[in-house]
């Protein structure tokens, strides 16, 4: 389970589904600002009450999917 999801469940009393939806929403916000460091930090702090230290935990699925797609495309060429 994602570390941020665990925090939201334990700290805020969210269900796992609620925490995952919140995390997806924050990922979308961070992607929308093109991962701008200052804006990303503000989003993480305001939306999740967390420090920028959790950025990797928040965007990991996005980064992992993009790397996977690049690898897949590379293998096709």
Image (cartoon, rainbow, N blue to C red):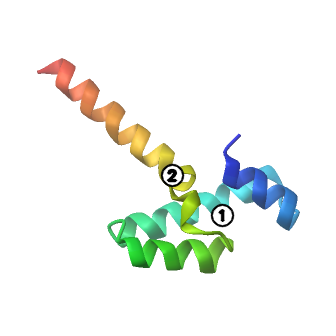
Which is more N-terminal, label 2 or label 1? Answer: 1
Residue occupying image coordinates x 77% and y 57%:
7
Q: Which mark identifies residue 14?
A: none
> At numbered mark 2, what does the secondary structure look like: helix, strand or loop?
helix
State the image coordinates of residue 18 (x, y, percent, origin top left): 75, 59
Q: Is residue 18 left or right of residue 28?
A: right
Tell me whether the residue at label 1 lies in contact with that at label 2, contact meaning CB atoms closer than 8 angstroms.
no
Which quadrant of the structure image shows residue 39?
bottom left
Q: Quadrant of the N terminus?
A: top right
Q: Is 15 placed above or below 45 here?
A: above
Q: Which is more toward the observer, 60 or 69?
A: 60
Residue lying farthest left?
77
Residue occupying image coordinates x 42% and y 38%:
64
State the image coordinates of residue 10 (x, y, percent, origin top left): 86, 57
* Residue pointed to by mark 1: 22
Q: Which mark identifies residue 56?
A: 2
Q: Nearer the viewer, mark 1 or mark 2?
A: 2
Residue occupying image coordinates x 39% and y 63%:
31
Q: Is residue 33 left or right of residue 7?
A: left
Which quadrant of the structure image shows residue 37?
bottom left
Q: Which is more toward the observer, 26 or 39?
A: 39
Which quadrant of the structure image shows residue 73?
top left
Residue occupying image coordinates x 50% and y 61%:
27
Distance CA(mark 1)–CA(mark 2): 16 Å
């Amino acid at each position: 389970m994602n570390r941020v999801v665990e925090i939201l469940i334990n700290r805020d009393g969210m269900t796992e589904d609620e925490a995952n939806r919140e995390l997806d929403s924050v990922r979308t916000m961070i992607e929308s600002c093109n991962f701008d460091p200052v804006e990303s930090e503000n989003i993480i702090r305001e939306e999740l009450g967390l420090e920028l230290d959790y950025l990797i935990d928040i965007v990991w699925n996005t980064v992992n999917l993009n790397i996977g797609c690049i690898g897949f495309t590379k293998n096709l060429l």
